[in-house]
Image (tube, rainbow, N blue to C red):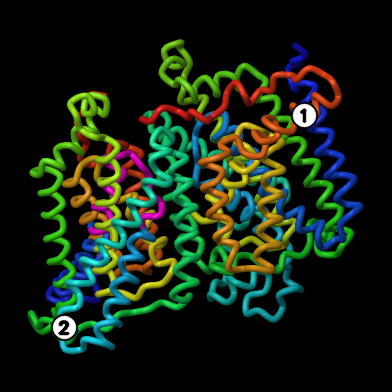
Amino acid sequence: MNDSRFATRSELIGILVLAVLLVVILPLCLDVFRLNLVAKYLTYAFVALGLVICWGYGGILSLGQGVFFGLGGYCMAMFLKLEASSVENTKIQSTPGIPDFMDWNQITALPFFWKPFHSLTFTIAAVILVPGIFALIIGAAMFKRRVGGTYFAIITQAVAAILTILIVGQQGYTGGINGMTDLRTLKGWDIRPDHAKVVLYFFEVGLLFACIFIAQFVRHSKLGRILVAMRDQEDRVRFSGYSVANFKIFAFCIAAIFAAIGGAMFALNVGFMSPSFVGIVPSIEMVIYTAVGGRLSILGAVYGTILVNFAKTSLSESFPELWLFGLGGLFIAVVLAFPNGLAGIWGDYVQPRISKLIGTRKPKSDWTDNSVADGAPAE
Amino acid sequence: MFGDYSIGDLGSIFVMQGFAGLILFSVYVLMALGLAIIFGQMGVINMAHGEFMILGAYVTWMTSNFFQSYLPSLFSGYFFLAMVLAFLASGALGMLVEWMLIRHLYKRPLDTLLATWGLSLMLQQAYRSIFGAREVGVELPQWMLGSLHVTDAIEVPINGVFVMGLTVLITIGVAYIMFRSRWGRQVRAVVQNRIMAGAVGINTAKVDRYTFALGCGIAGVAGSAFTMIGSTGPTSGQLYIVDTFLVVVFGGAASLLGTIASAFSISQTQSTLEFFMSGSMAKVLTLLAVVGILMLRPQGLFALKVRK
């Protein structure tokens, strides 16, 4: 078997194809506006990647990934907002030097938890650490008590609801329902013009591949195999002497951090952050990206995200009525008919034909032996 | 916080807020009852539960419109017919959904969650296409308007009292069905041990289908009652779904008594807090408390001791 620590040969080819697509083909074919749309889609791909590890391998369905996406995004947006609200930019406010929405809400001094966000280093650390620690706390509280499955999904969903209500309610501190808009510069570098968007796109693709490599590493390490074992027969793993809770916490934290990186890139690429990316509805939509791509396929998550979002943009542009039917139908179809998503269809139908054409023997792909079609036993 | 009010004022405030809490409690109980049956007894997460409730609300609205146009003399009694129709409509839809969707997914509870979420999106869009995006409200019959005058400071709206009475009746009915009838015994047998229940001759697939339909039907009645106190829009159901799931989980999934107790405590906490702070903060605090308690006691308030 040509299984290295890291990736099989077919996986390496897959990664290369994705790299060529994202780095060469899309930037050459699309104008800057469309490329920026792709950049927006790719921010969700980070979340989908995290869900592959957490849900596909670990069997932990989190319906609150929007929370971590939002936390990462808000951390980044706070930094950018502070930079955009320098004293000379905000002369007309009654208190210059604080973000405009604070001024509108009669807040006269920068709240204490905003102050560290003047520093970019602190912000980058916060983008990773705040969601990471939050996930650690939730994960530790839940998994140590052996709460899992549907209960966990409901609780994460409740957390998403709480955070949304909190952000919307505390308008003076968070920008309320409008979120943080009008983000302008990053360390004096304007993020709004076209060339900046292109630079940010390539930076984001670089980060995405870093995350893909981390995910690949997790998958091929012993850790990844324990995660899969735990998903399929939790008790046996526990009886073999592994601490199931710690592995689950780890998977959940990785997913949270990936989501947070996506959120931070969203704030940079799109130029605003609002609670509409935090709540229950976006969180579940993020799960469908993973499900469409194939919950066991790292690259599938990226393709699934791009395809679903592309369909959403084009369908809701031309037939807004149809989009929700389409999305709802997609949920049902993916669950009922294609539990392994696009990656499953690829592996079932396309790959064998290609192999036949080239004349090589079909390499046994990974997802067939841990197919989810039978699913975990009901609790 | 309390400084500006006299003792008597505070008493009235607590009674009035307590009453507002009781109405919220009725909505929670009505929604949670159906969910407790479906989730607690069958382990199926039905994210479309809110949409079944809204179906009941729309049926009530249509019935009220029908009576207004064709049978104005009987208008004061339309609600009782509407409730039956709402039950039948939601129950029938529930049966259809169980047959087409849910029964294939009993072994994959997390996937049921996603599939029913998809269903809820489609139903929402269907309501939007059929009934329009704007919220609709029913005309209340004359006898339901106005309020009961208890003391100078305390007034109780009649429609609220009616909804609460209805809640009590439906709860008793459900408890009777689940714990006294032959069919309820079959449901509980299937929950406790599906294979043995099948072995002694219970048609488990049929029991599943009717249980799901009953849960959805109760959601329809809940929607019907909901029209008495609020207006209905395509996405109204989604507003309550997470709260309701929390109510069911907080109460202990398989326990009807727990569901009622948790609905009571959550709604009372929320409506009492609402008076002293903004509505959003009251909700945040209530939900946080519930999530916090659930982290300490994952089995909920009343846990059934069942050997797994």
Give above or below for A189 relative to B82. above
Q: Which residues are magenta?
A: B30-49
Q: Is residue A32 visible?
A: yes
Quarter in which the N terminus of chain A is drawn = top right
Image location of residue A340, percent across then percent down: 60, 35
- Residue type at mark 1 is Arg
Left or right: B148 as drawn, with respect to A219 = left
Left or right: A102 as drawn, with respect to B259 = right
The span from disc 1 to disc 2 (Cα, nearest Å) is 69 Å
Q: Main secondary structure of the magenta part?
A: helix
- Residue nearer the viewer, A92 or B71: B71
Q: Is residue B289 visible?
A: no
Residue contact at pointers 1 and 2, CB within 8 angstroms: no
Which residue is depicted at the point 76% across and 53% down?
A39
- Read off the chain for label 2: B
Image location of residue B220, percent across then percent down: 28, 62
Task: Give the residue pinned by disc 2.
Answer: B76
Q: In terms of secondary structure, where does tag 2 sit?
A: helix
- Residue type at mark 2 is Ser
Q: Residues within 10 Å of mark 1 (few under 14, many from 20)?
A: few
Give above or below for B174 relative to B275. above
Task: Give the residue pinned by disc 1.
Answer: A353
Image location of residue A225, percent across then percent down: 59, 19
